[in-house]
Amino acid sequence: SLVGSLKVAVVTAVFATVIGTLAAFGLDRMKSRVSGVLRALLITPMVVPGVVLAVGIYAVYLDTRLVGTMTGFVLAHTMLAVPFVIIAVSASLEVFDKRLETAAASLGATRLMAFRTVTLPLIAPGILSGLLFAFVTSFDEIIVALFITSPYLKTLPVQIFSSITRDADPTVAAVGTLLFITTSLVIGAGLLIGSRQGKR
């Protein structure tokens, strides 16, 4: 269960970070009311009750045979994690001085080069924060996982929940502690790296 949770969380974090970063960058460049509507739609998974999302995802997965698959878990968790990445990256873009991109362009840099050499390094702390939020969101998620789990793929939170409801297994406490420590270490590492980059 631990290995399965880590695999799902890592893949989810990567996908969610890429999608969320591109979405945040695109929304930041849009200067219309449409951007507000799109932003609201993209962060909807944060405000919709988890059970409602889980039922909807389960219904779709039944038709597409994604229940209990790695692909199914990654897609569902990515949908849940993308809003956190968008918010984190958008916060970095809010304080980013866009005149730096203009200066880079005046020196002959293309848009892609300016983004890679100027924008990306400066918003890296926000991207890193989004990555960590995405990882933790996937690693700790249980509501959707309970609906789409299978005997062949169970995440750690689902395994803990099953052990608690079936019997009083003392290993549950140890696993729960491991889950807490892992999450705390990931968040702590992210905060440390982010603070060091901020000082630079």
Image: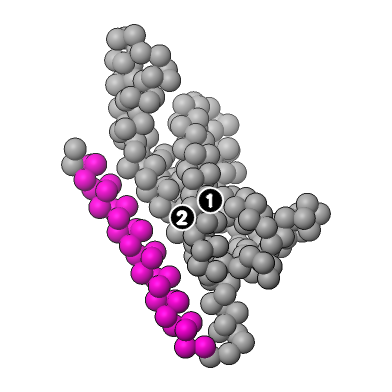
**Left or right side of 199 for 77:** right
**Figure check: 51 above or below 81:** below
Q: Residue 120 location, x and y as percent?
A: 36, 31
Residue shown at the point (64%, 69%) measured from the top left: 146
Tell me where residue 105 appears, x and y as whole percent: 35, 13
Whether residue 184 is visible, yes or no, is yes
- Tell me the tag on residue 135: 2
Looking at the rendering, the stretch of residues picked out in magenta corresponds to: 169-198
Secondary element at tag 1: helix
Residue furthest right as drawn: 63
Residue kind at label 2, given as amino acid type: Phe
Residue under label 1: 12
Q: Is residue 5 above or below residue 161?
A: above
Q: Amino acid at mark 1?
A: Thr
Q: Name, please, the residue furthest toward the bottom.
A: 168
Residue 103: x and y in percent read: 29, 15
Q: Is residue 154 above or below residue 18?
A: below
Q: Does the segment drawn in magenta span residue 180?
A: yes
